[in-house]
Image (tube, rainbow, N blue to C red):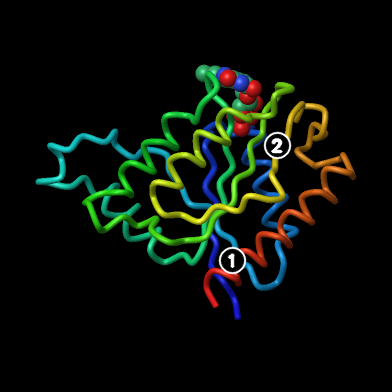
Amino acid sequence: KKYKVAVIVGSLRKESYNLKTAKVLMEIAPESLSTELLDIAGIPMYNQDLEENTPKEWVELRENVKKYDALLFLTPEYNRSVPAVLKNALDVGSRPPGKSCWNAKPAAIVSVSTGSISGFGANHHLRQSLTFLNVPTMAQPEAYIGGVADLFDDQGNLTNNSTKEFLKTFMLAFEKWVITHLE
Ligand code: FNR
């Protein structure tokens, strides 16, 4: 059986290390996980007044996410927390009450940072929201990718072998996590 995994990247920039890491994870994903990038750019900021005349981007996000079995988040850390674009996507998808598109989808988080604290703050703030959203998020192995600028070459290839091996282990554990929750 194949499981559809939405890969959600919390950085919008073209040369994003989170995006580069996402592409590596998609390449090395085990057979049973079929991964796709889910675009969260351009989603209007959450405003409850707009629920009466829902922006089309909100409808698309809510419907799109429902097509996936599982979620793989890659997040940078902005000021020790999650970038607003990612938090906004979570907020938009969580409404209306009782109809959250995120509900019960197994997930995993990889935080990626140029710094040495490796996005710990963002990783755990994201876990806090996902816990409330009833998204079972893999606890182990944790994935904190720090000092990321040294791990890729100029062409965007991951050149650090121990990181590559770790990411393979991580994806195998995530596959197990998904199967356990969805079987
Ligand atoms: C950052 N950065 C950052 N890094 C970190 O480790 N902890 C932090 O709190 C912050 N805060 C922060 C705020 C803002 C507004 C920006 C733009 C950046 C640095 C950040 O980790 C770095 O820019 C990453 O390369 C961003 O990820 P992408 O875009 O490469 O995926």
Above or below, 164 relative to 33: above
In the visual, does 31 lie left or right of 133? Answer: right
Extreme left residue here?
Answer: 52
Q: Residue furthest bottom?
A: 1
- Who is closer to the viewer here, 137 or 145? 137
Image quadrant, ligand 1: top right
Residue 2 placement (x, y as % from top left): 59, 76
The foreground one among 8 and 141 is 141
Residue drawn 88% across and 44% down?
Answer: 162
Q: Secondary structure at mark 2?
A: strand
Q: Position of residue 48 (x, y in %)?
A: 17, 38
Q: Is residue 18 left or right of residue 37?
A: right
Q: Which of the pair 170/40 is nearer the observer?
A: 170
Q: In the image, what residue occupies the spot 64% across and 43% down?
A: 110
Circle number at residue 178? 1
161 and 41: which is toward the camera: 161
Comes first in the chain, label 2 or label 1 = 2
Dot 1 beta carbon under 8 Å from ligand 1: no
Spatial CA span between label 2 and label 1: 20 Å
Where is 142 relative to 71, above or below? above
Task: Tell me the quarter of the image containing the C terminus.
Answer: bottom right
Query: Which kind of residue does numbered mark 2 sit on?
Result: Tyr
How far across and how far down the image is residue 124, in percent?
55, 35
Q: Locate residue 113: give its quadrant.
A: top right
Q: Amino acid at mark 1?
A: Val
Q: Which residue is mark 2?
A: 144
Q: Secondary structure at mark 1?
A: helix
Q: Residue at x 53, y 67 (%)?
A: 4
Which class describes the residues within 10 Å of circle 1: few (<14), some (14-19), or many (20+)? many
Neighbourhood count class around disc 2 (C-alpha, 10 Å): few under 14, some 14–19, many 20 upward: some
Please provide percent x and percent y for residue 130: 45, 46
